[in-house]
Image (cartoon, grey):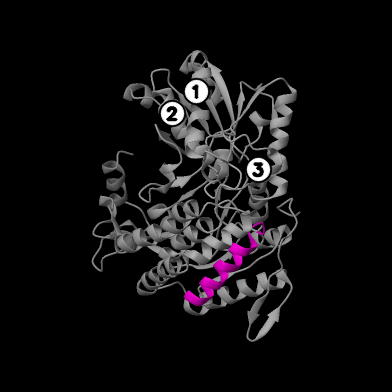
Amino acid sequence: MPFHEDPSLNESALEEDGETVADPIAALQAGYDRLRTAWNEKGGLSYDERMRHLKALSKAVKARKDELIAAVNQDYGNRSAHETGLAEIMRIVESAAYARANLLDWTDAQEREVGWQLRPATARVIYQPKGVVGIMAPWNYPIQLSLDPLVAALAAGCRSLIKPSELTPATGAAIEKILRDTLPADVVQVVHGDGAVGAAFASLPLDHLLFTGSTRVGKMIMKAAAENLTPLTLELGGKSPTIIHPSFSISKAAERIAWAKCFNAGQTCVAPDYVMVHKDQMEAFVGGLQSSFAKMYPKVAGNPDYTCIINDHHHRRLLRLVSEAEQRGVKVVRCTPSGETDEQLGRRLPLTILVNPPTDAAVMQDEIFGPVLPVVPYTDVEECIRFVNARPRPLALYYFDNRQKRIDDVLARTTSGGAGINECLVHVTQESMPFGGVGPSGMGSYHGYSGFLAFSHEKSVMQQSRLNGMAMLNPPYGGVANLFGKLSGI
């Protein structure tokens, strides 16, 4: 079953020993075989190779940032160059730098305690690369979500097969070219294709697979990977809630939420999906959103700072969500400070606020993935906690409050992949913290040390001393075995 509803936007080819493989499935298999052969013959990457490849990757991304920014812009129709620079280029450079700075500590064996019964044996955990790993990237941050997992895989010493999204073909081609020019072909391969290629990719006998995308497709990925018992890291999504305590500044909350919801036009897996506001502050909050949006984007049409929706399919999907709510009597507030028409806006969809939509509306059921923001009234925070807990566990939760006791209470009583307090989105940029979902929003985590662990096998090693008393425990069992039992309390 194909993993994407959208048709393939490009065909790929793989150069193999001077021959061109036109069939994308054949290209996929050839790429995998090349990496598997290298793994079987050479194993994982040495420490020096890891450090060298991480440095080369960072240097190449910086040197060819204009090429990458232009490619993403081509795929989107318009993608803010600053957003690409901040969320994609800078992200990879910082990620690689963090891995290089900490890799020696990460790869060190960890000494572990040995029970008195087995002393003078020693115990340690060593970290080995898992092998040939797969990275399936989505279209919303096509550079970051292809190369950030690659940083983790390189740090762990793995060989990587990458499939960029078919919805960002120019970016995928740019990534492939940069990686071909920068890293050895037996360390990383890039393959392209549509949902059929994605299905074949997930069915390969990989040693680990990291997939970023929707929960719906994640289920299919997991099912395909199960045939080979491939271990998975699934970075999915869901409806990330935002709660504003009545004591918090409505104008400040509105500014931060408007920024987060409009960054990349809301096409972010951890974007605020809906906001819960005290019923007496609804009007003030909606006004604050409008004011904040107008300051950031005095005009929408033709504004290079405002990113387009990725394609017509997703643009129509978002318009349907708004239309369905409007037909049910929901108040819709479209933020167009310059009064542009739909024809002038094209695929630049302005911040669109839906005031108190019913909970069974499509916009309250499906992940939005765009600048459409439901605002839900509440009477007390307890109601918010019950509302959040009655729904699938989200990838992120945001809470605006200055009272630490209340903050801790909300964090303790809700479950989410990550959380932001008085801020949105930026928690995922911190390399020192794991990034991942929980339940329907994901499985496993990466970034920084967590990424190194995701692609590493933690091997437990016990080493017995040449002089030891293990022979005293051989059958026939007698006094020593009985003594051990008594000393152990059994």
Give SS at disc 2. helix
Residue 338 visible in the snapshot: yes
Position of the N terminus, as image quadrant, is bottom right
How far separated are the C-alphas under marks 3 and 1? 25 Å
Foreground: 180 or 255?
255
Q: Which region is colored magenta?
A: 166-182
How far separated are the C-alphas under marks 2 and 1? 8 Å
Picture coordinates of residue 287, whole percent (x, y): 51, 23
Tag 3 residue: 345
Callout 3 amino acid: Leu
Tag 2 residue: 253
Magenta-drawn stretch, dominant element (helix, strand or loop): helix
Picture coordinates of residue 450, whole percent (x, y): 41, 52
Foreground: 76 or 467?
76
Determine if the magenta segment contains residue 170: yes
Where residue 48 is drawn, which disc sits there?
none
Tell me the residue at 37%/56% (across/down).
476
Picture coordinates of residue 119, whole percent (x, y): 25, 56
Position of the C terminus, as image quadrant, is top left
Callout 1 amino acid: Phe
User: Does the CB distance between marks 2 and 1 fall below 8 Å?
Assistant: yes
Q: Does 129 appear above or below 343?
A: below
